[in-house]
Image (spheres, rainbow, N blue to C red):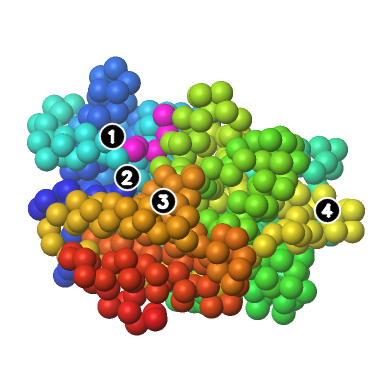
Amino acid sequence: MNLRKLKSGSDVRGIAVGEEAVLTADVARVLGKAFAVYVASKTGKSVADVTIALGRDSRVSGPALLQGAAEGIVAAGAQAVDYGMCTTPAMYMAILTEGFQPDGSIMVTASHHPWKLNGLKFFTAEGGLGFAELDEVLSLAENPAENNDVPGTLTQKPFLPTYQEHLKQLIINGVDPEVQKPLLGLHVVVDAGNGAGGFYANMLEELGAWVEGSQFLEPDGLFPNHIPNPENKEAMASISEAVKRVGADLGVIFDTDCDRAAIVDQTGKEINRNRLIAMISVILLEEMPGATIVTDSVTSSGLADFIKEWGGEHYRYKRGYRNVIDEAIRLNEAGINCPLAIETSGHAALRDNHFLDDGMYLVTVMLIRAMQLKQQGETLGKLLEGLREPVESTEIRLKVQGEDFTNTARQLIEHVLEYATEHEDWHIAPDNREGVRISFDADGELNSAWFLLRLSVHDPVMPLNAESDVPGGVKTVLAKLYEALKGQEGVDLAPLEAAL
């Protein structure tokens, strides 16, 4: 099969169950072998001296894919170590942890996607593979080497208990190093969505927290209760209801492999997307005034103002968690103090955590602050005071037609930019780094409504985001964009017409 069709950003992903399966144990075997050869070339080691760790989330296809990838590693002559059930961030942390330190690791997961899908994420000491590095692995997989005359070995060694201890120590040191139960008195509901993160509730309980109301902690690869996704409305409604039902201080929810997370406050209010970015930004800006916060491109105007009011710099960049992480790393190398890269999806990478997108680390930092505030008689909600949120918001996906959809989308974006320069009421965003972002003075308020039109990271689609701080502003800006695009070829405007 064409392995390139499995490429999804910097991961490999596809249907892994049933007759339509394209990501099979055989494919995983080929990819595992290629990755072992890739790691050997990057480390300068012989393949026989390379160790690759493997972990998986709770998906039903996970064991077979992990076994397939392990067999490929062994066939290459390298050493494979099966960590069993794990989280995606843990698979990178293992590379840095004394007593483990594999040369590379593979996580078998498809994140929040439906249970029939699965995927592979690859890590080396430098972090998760980027787009170009994955291309190198796929090239090796397309031209596989002969099996090594001396096969490697496959052993089992759980890493999750070590990763859990790492998180525990963060909380102990962050709240009170003198006590072993620093969360005594804090009531936290944990929702793991039947993914890999159920152990977090047990860990909090060991630290003294009350976890009554926690739900869906047992791994179940069919996800019978709700989609494990902090952006999913049903999932967020479920944990919100659980928090209110038991009167908890807050709730935390993870996606399947725990690289994303969100929280809800004691009233059941969702703290995700812009609110999540605002809250972690405040926590960091309290420690580092003037720091730069890198986000993706669809964040709200109110968030930008909020970060500025807290003394920070808001730096909008491209969608895609690897994009925001790589840009934050680049800014730090350029001498700019940038402690956080975060997407509205919940992917958050902190400099203190090796710029690894780790939902559990993010939640752990916020729980420490929640406990500190509780000791002062306050709640996490206090940190969001002054955040202006949009009155209206929407996302519309416009299909791009033709085979060369990337070039078509670029031409459409250039057309909108040119159109904007010819209309005084169209204000091109000064920090526009992806697609085209235009703001308008709706209802007499300066820059009170905006849209962002861009090309999807993966699909022949142009996502269109629009927000307004005043009623009716979204429809106003959508109507203006429709006038600009009307008559242009290569894009299906039906969804935009329907919104009007």
Q: Which mark is residue 319?
A: 3
Q: Secondary structure at mark 3?
A: loop
Residue type at numbered disc 3: Arg
Q: N-terminal of the two: label 3 or label 2?
A: 2
Q: CA distance from mark 1 to mark 4?
A: 43 Å
Q: Secondary structure at mark 2?
A: loop
Q: N-terminal of the two: label 4 or label 3?
A: 3
Task: Let me know if residue 135 appears in the view.
Answer: yes
**Which residue is at the front of the view, 219 or 255?**
255
The quadrant holding residue 75 is: top left
**Which quadrant holds the C terminus?**
bottom left
Q: Position of residue 497 (x, y in %)?
A: 33, 79
Question: Mark 2 = which residue?
Answer: 10
Which numbered mark, 4 or 3, is in the foreground of this view?
3
Say whether residue 160 is left or right of residue 103.
right
Question: Mark 4 = which residue?
Answer: 373
Q: CA distance from mark 4 to mark 3?
A: 33 Å
From which residue to which does the magenta span run?
Answer: 126-130
Q: N-terminal of the two: label 1 or label 4?
A: 1
Q: CA distance from mark 1 to mark 3?
A: 19 Å
